[in-house]
Amino acid sequence: MDSVAQKSLTSGFNLNLGALKEPLAFIRLLEWVFSIFAFATTAGYSGTTSIIIQCHGSPSSQEIVANFNYPFSMKEHPFDVPDCTSNGTTTTRYRLSGEFVSSAQFFVCIGVFAFLYSIASLVLYLGYQHVYRASSRGPIVDLLLTAALAFLWLTASSTWAKGLTDVKFFTSPSTIVRMVTECKNVGNKCTAGTMPHMGRLNASVIFGFLNLILWGGNCWFIYKETPFHKSADQPANEEGVRPS
């Protein structure tokens, strides 16, 4: 009975911030921060693009504005263009082209999963370090999950980088000019208006690949905690021992 109580007591929470000085916990802290940056810069994005159209014989021009946002289902963002044949009294509705929901949401989903796992593992590293290293199960599971997330970061970042390239193309004012029928009619003048600001989305891709580097690199430090690394070192140590 006393041994059970003692085991329960020794496996309790014991905060040790000194673990942050070790690569295992410090890199995990960086992963937690950069995972937030990755999904936050994508999920909260909204942008605006526009063209300027001047009908033949009209002294004034009109700016046509199209808004779009995460998760980048472009068909859900219509914009109205005045009909030059009716002196602008009627309009034709257009929609932005492209569907990038899957790549954007997959990237955000991996970011959220990485964020949650980072929190859970940090609690383990800082509060239950003695439990984590008491058996080989903890480091092995940690290694497998970290390697899986590193692979998912590679997949998600690559997919989202391609998706972002397409988002830039289909929201470019020059692409919209080529899409609008009134801009194809001789006499009407269409020019590019406001370019969408993509700096935030560019940063999300950078954060995605930084996460790939962090999670992939951290696999080595977790591997050193597993019995695979320790058993590989053991024969070398035994060879170095000589009887006196």
Image: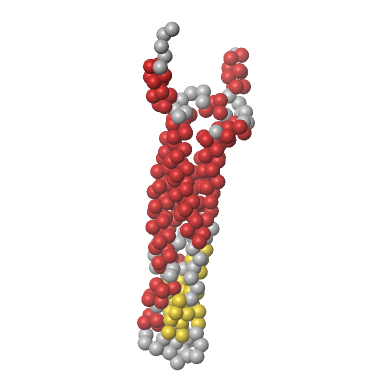
Residue at the image point whose x is 43% and y is 41% from the top: 216
Residue at the image point whose x is 61% and y is 18% from the top: 5
* Residue placed most toward the observer, 240 or 175: 240
Residue farthest to the top, as pictured? 244
- The answer to whether residue 141 is above or below residue 185 is above
The N terminus appears in which quarter of the rendering? top right
Residue at the image point whose x is 50% and y is 79% from the top: 63
Whether residue 6 can be seen here: yes
* Residue placed most toward the observer, 147 or 107: 147
In percent of width and height, residue 136 lies at 46, 25
Residue farthest to the bottom, as pictured? 57
Residue farthest to the front, as pictured? 244
The C terminus appears in which quarter of the rendering? top left
- The answer to whether residue 170 is above or below residue 151 is below
Whether residue 146 can be seen here: no
In percent of width and height, residue 183 lies at 40, 81
* Residue placed most toward the observer, 2 or 188: 188
Say left or right for 11 vs 148. right
